Amino acid sequence: MAEGKGVLIVGEMANGNLAAMTTELLGIGRKLADDLGEELSAVLMGGEVGGMAEEAIKFGADKVYVIESPLLKEYVTDSYVAAMAKLCEEIKPNILLMGQTSMGRDLAPRLAFRLGTGLTTDCLELSIDPDTKLMLQTKPVYGGNALSIVVCEVTRPQMATIRPKSMDPLERNDSRKGEIVAYDAGLDESAIRVKFIEKVEEEVVGVKLEDADVVVVGGRGMGGPEPFAQLEELAKLLGGAVGASRPPCDSGWVPTTWQVGLTGKMVTPTLYIGVALSGASQHLAGCSGSKTMVAINKDPEANIFKVCQFGIVGDFKKVLPPFIDKVKELKKG
Amino acid sequence: MNIIVCVKEIPDPETPASAFAIDEAAMRAIPAKDTPPVISPFDEQAVEAALRLKDSLGAKVTVLSMGASSAEKVLKHTLSMGADEAFLLSDSSFENSDSTSAAYTLAQAIKKVGEYDMIICGRQAGDFDSGQVGSGIAEMLGIPSVTVAKKIETLDGKAKVERVLPDGYEVVEVSLPALITVSNELGEPRYATLKGIMAAAKKTVPVWNAAEIGADVASIGTEGRKTKMLKLFIPVRESKCEFIEGENEEETAVKLAQKLREVKLI
């Protein structure tokens, strides 16, 4: 077996602070490191990110590697992979974790292949096997219909990306102490084959589906574009966002950007309300991470009732108006 | 321009969960009787991306798939959409591949095809959702990769790619040859035309085995895996659905709202 010691997580910044995902990575990383009796390190990469190193320590890191370079200002595959490969070859971590984020999805696979090791993406659970000391990596497959447990036996690091909001961060502890190391990745500009041109932000009206704490989703049974107005009213009332399963998007009732599912958006709200949809695995793949699921459907045999916690068998046209009224009343009270 | 597209045959993701079953001992899905396997949705969009480039500036589109003999159907489908040729990589020693052995096998086949300016893959396969094979092929071939594209344009030996981000997109430029993975934001794949279906019917799909692509037996299938699956199972749902009942819809609706209030969700 290849040697490796310590747990390393790759941090990310959001709005001038550590991203929520990074505190979640530090949370699970701390637990794995403690179970192994090893150190937890974090690496921060960017144009200027050193200011965040103390913050990573307060959320659980023993050591923080800071890699600053103008070539890391924007995320670009070649420069980030090169920086991480150099660091990993030098410190030889046992475990390397990233978020299943825009960056993690791109960086982790290419880095795993460069390091010649195995990677499991989009994990929901990680733990240490008490006998083998291997990291057990649990990930959903077949649209969330099944789970697989995977290990990386021989090569190091054992790599995984983690689905956002699946791990708990630690409480911030201001008295935690740690070491900060400025690391020179020695990046060579001529080896960077992908050039960043520009970023275009698209305006979103209201709450973004992926970030929403409440998601209201309509399906084929909505019958047309008009009834979605009711879902929008309900979502607004609950401070959430509206989505749709694939059929309403394919039929042009709602924009395709509303689609929740394997080929659409991945949502992880506290409350999911599915209206007039059957619960095809295609759709469930995008919402199985919801904390509580509620379904309203005419068909008592609909698959969605197998995965939700609360259900109403009935016509949404008759159920939604009194439901919306009652929610309004409760909100006021 | 020469474009190679890699596609995978998967169990239909629209299969109702009730018809989905796992053979836990063999650690694989049991094919549903009434729903035949399909091309992975993102891979169909990869074919679409290649065909759009073919439409606009002319290109030869070659499609590869590693899989069982049934995957020939998936390849025929891509030919009927407008791809020029297709090869099936099939060998019992390819079975049980993980992302590493799959990327190796496809990279070997790409080397056998020879000339390419661009390789296009789906962002992830719709069964294991791993999203590693595209980047892996690029690393093995030593070419740059750009993932989750929604638009690809080419000019002067470069590709300009729009990459999907959570709050919009970014534009990057990459030198060719390059590997690009596409996301669903690319848009709907085209339907096969009757003419396309007839033309595809006349074409044969050659099958390449491990020896024909010069594969090292230690790098394919089970032997080439870097990861090991310990278990594949359908999780037991902890919470059963609590059906809210009442005299009429109104009463039921009110009870549901109260229930959600009780559990502090409203």
Image (cartoon, rainbow, N blue to C red):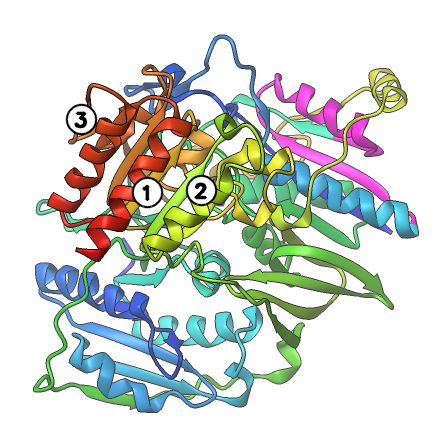
Marks 1 and 2 close (CB-CB < 8 Å) = yes
Please tell me whether mark 1 sits on a helix, a strand or a loop.
helix
Residue carrying label 3: B240
Question: Marks 3 and 1, Cα distance to the nearest angstrom?
Answer: 25 Å
Relative image position of residue A196 (x, y in whole percent): 64, 76
Label 2 marks a residue whose chain is A
Q: Quadrant of residue A2?
A: bottom left
Residue carrying label 2: A230
Determine whether A215 is above or below B28 in the image. Answer: below
Which residue type does callout 2 highlight?
Gln
Which residue type does callout 1 highlight?
Ile
Which residue type does callout 3 highlight?
Lys
> Mark 2 or mark 3: which is in front?
2
Residue carrying label 1: A324
Q: Is residue A304 left or right of residue A252?
A: left
> Mark 3 or mark 1: which is in front?
1
Determine whether B123 is above or below B203 in the image. Answer: below
Label 3 marks a residue whose chain is B
Q: Residue at x 26, y 32 (%)?
A: B253
- The residues colored magenta run B58-86
Q: Which mark is residue B65?
A: none
Marks 3 and 1 close (CB-CB < 8 Å) = no
For label 3, the crowd category at 10 Å Cα-Cα, with few meaning under 14, some 14 to 19 and many 20 or more, is few
For label 2, the crowd category at 10 Å Cα-Cα, with few meaning under 14, some 14 to 19 and many 20 or more, is some
Is residue B149 visible in the rendered image? The answer is yes
Please tell me whether mark 3 sits on a helix, a strand or a loop.
loop
Q: Residue at x 44, y 27 (%)?
A: A280
